[in-house]
Image (spheres, rainbow, N blue to C red):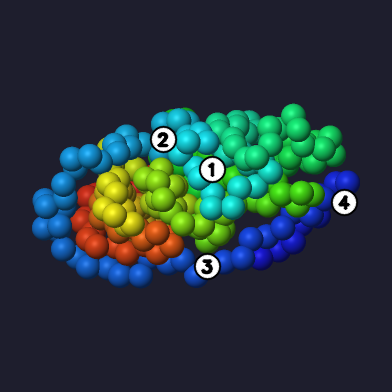
Amino acid sequence: KRLRTLPLGLALVAVASFGLAACTYTFNEGAFETFDVQNALVISDNLSFVEDLGEAHIQPDTTPDFWEIRIAGENGYQTIGMGGSKAFSELPAATAEAVQSLELMEGAPIFCGDGPRFACYVYIISVTGDAIEVVSNADELVHFLGTIDTPSEAALVAMADNYYFSDGWIRQDGTRYTVLATAIEKGQPWECTPGSVKLTTYQVLLEIGELGRIDVVARKHLEDRCVDF
């Protein structure tokens, strides 16, 4: 991880990794037919899901002074949820200014706007004392959250590990979560005409444990297409 220095002596601390990884692939298409959607959280797409996130959906084991979740795009960022032991107005002026001036284009990729490309990113800013942490990938997210104890947290972990939702589902089974999501793999340059790239879409059935481990239970091919870039 890289350490980046913020104005006014505030440190942007890189979060330690937990070694999170999708660790098994079982090509068992029958698993999709037995997936029980009763009592499952429906997620139509990543963008609408994150726009509804708030303090009730994200519950870190160790509460920072302040955190906020953002969607970042070409025109800046939008804060879509926040929490912590303090309101933003209660932060020291220098800290608040540093948080507001921090703009990134990294995090969980999501579709926003028109076209097939990932145009926006979701990340979290966390403040404890005078330290500001950027939570922008799956390992950092698991470190920030601690135990994954809500369906929304599990969905965020899946998104941060480059899965997305298109009429997907997530269901809690004790301390584990079953997730119906989608994965996109980029092909080789010669598979499409110049100026375009092949994208292969799969439907995936995931299991996510309370410590953030992701297992791919099943994967089913949906489509191949060439898109301009």
Nearer the observer, 38 or 137:
38
Label 2: which secondary element: helix
The residue where tag 3 is placed is 18
| Image quadrant containing the N terminus | bottom right
Give the left or right position of residue 186, taking residue 70 as reference: left
Q: Answer with mark 2 or mark 3, whichever residue precedes in sequence.
A: 3
Q: Answer with mark 1 or mark 3, whichever residue precedes in sequence.
A: 3
Report if the CB atoms under discs 2 and 4 are less than 8 Å apart. Answer: no
x and y percentages locating residue 59 in the rendered image: 51, 45
Q: Answer with mark 3 or mark 4, whichever residue precedes in sequence.
A: 4
Disc 2 vs disc 3: which is toward the camera? 3
The residue where tag 2 is placed is 49
Q: Answer with mark 2 or mark 1, whichever residue precedes in sequence.
A: 2
Q: Amino acid at mark 2?
A: Phe
Residue 217: mark: none
**Marks 2 and 1, how far apart at CA:** 11 Å
Label 4: which secondary element: helix
Give the left or right position of residue 62, taking residue 99 as reference: left
The residue where tag 4 is placed is 9
Q: Residue at x 19, y 42 (%)?
A: 37
**Marks 1 and 4, how far apart at CA:** 26 Å
x and y percentages locating residue 192 in the rendered image: 35, 54
Q: Answer with mark 1 or mark 4, whichever residue precedes in sequence.
A: 4
Nearer the observer, 173 or 116:
173
| Quadrant of residue 115 within the rendered picture | top left
Q: Answer with mark 2 or mark 4, whichever residue precedes in sequence.
A: 4
Report if the CB atoms under discs 3 and 4 are less than 8 Å apart. Answer: no
The residue where tag 1 is placed is 122
**Marks 3 and 4, how far apart at CA:** 28 Å
| Quadrant of residue 81 within the rendered picture | top right
Count the labels in the image.
4
Q: Amino acid at mark 3?
A: Phe
